[in-house]
Image (cartoon, rainbow, N blue to C red):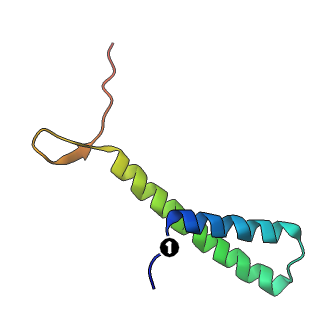
Amino acid sequence: MAEKTFETNLKDLENLVKELETGNVPLEDAIKKYTEAMELAKSCSEKLNTATEKVNKILADDGNLKDFEVKEEN
């Protein structure tokens, strides 16, 4: 099974949260939905961290990626 995209996971997470917020979910279902929501939140967080790491890299003159650093002038 193919891994779902960040956007799909986020939409699924939003839907689960809306369902749980209604308060009309039986306890057993609420526990399952909460567990699924936590797994989706973890997946989204990991994908965001990976994306942040990639964005914070720049291509150096030698063709290698290195961490992006802002040099402050005094």
Q: How many marks?
A: 1
Quadrant containing the C terminus in the rendered view: top left
Q: Amino acid at mark 1?
A: Lys
Quadrant containing the N terminus in the rendered view: bottom left
Residue drawn where x is 75% and y is 81% of the image: 31
Instruction: Tell me which corner region of the image, top left, top right, bottom left or bottom right, holds residue 41.
Output: bottom right
Residue drawn where x is 36% and y is 47% of the image: 55
Residue 45 horizontal/vertical position (percent): 52, 60
Mark 1 Cα-neighbour bin, 10 Å: few <14, some 14–19, many ≥20 = few
Please give left or right for residue 58 compared with residue 9 in the image: left
Instruction: Tell me which corner region of the image, top left, top right, bottom left or bottom right, holds residue 22.
Output: bottom right
Please give left or right for residue 26 compared with residue 66 in the image: right
Residue 6 horizontal/vertical position (percent): 51, 64
For mark 1, what is the residue? 4
Residue drawn where x is 13% and y is 46% of the image: 63
Please give left or right for residue 48 compared with residue 28 in the image: left
Element at label 1: loop
Q: Residue furthest left?
A: 62
Q: Residue furthest right?
A: 24
Residue drawn where x is 72% and y is 78% of the image: 33
Residue placed most toward the observer, 71 or 4? 4
Residue 7 horizontal/vertical position (percent): 55, 62
Residue 16 horizontal/vertical position (percent): 72, 71
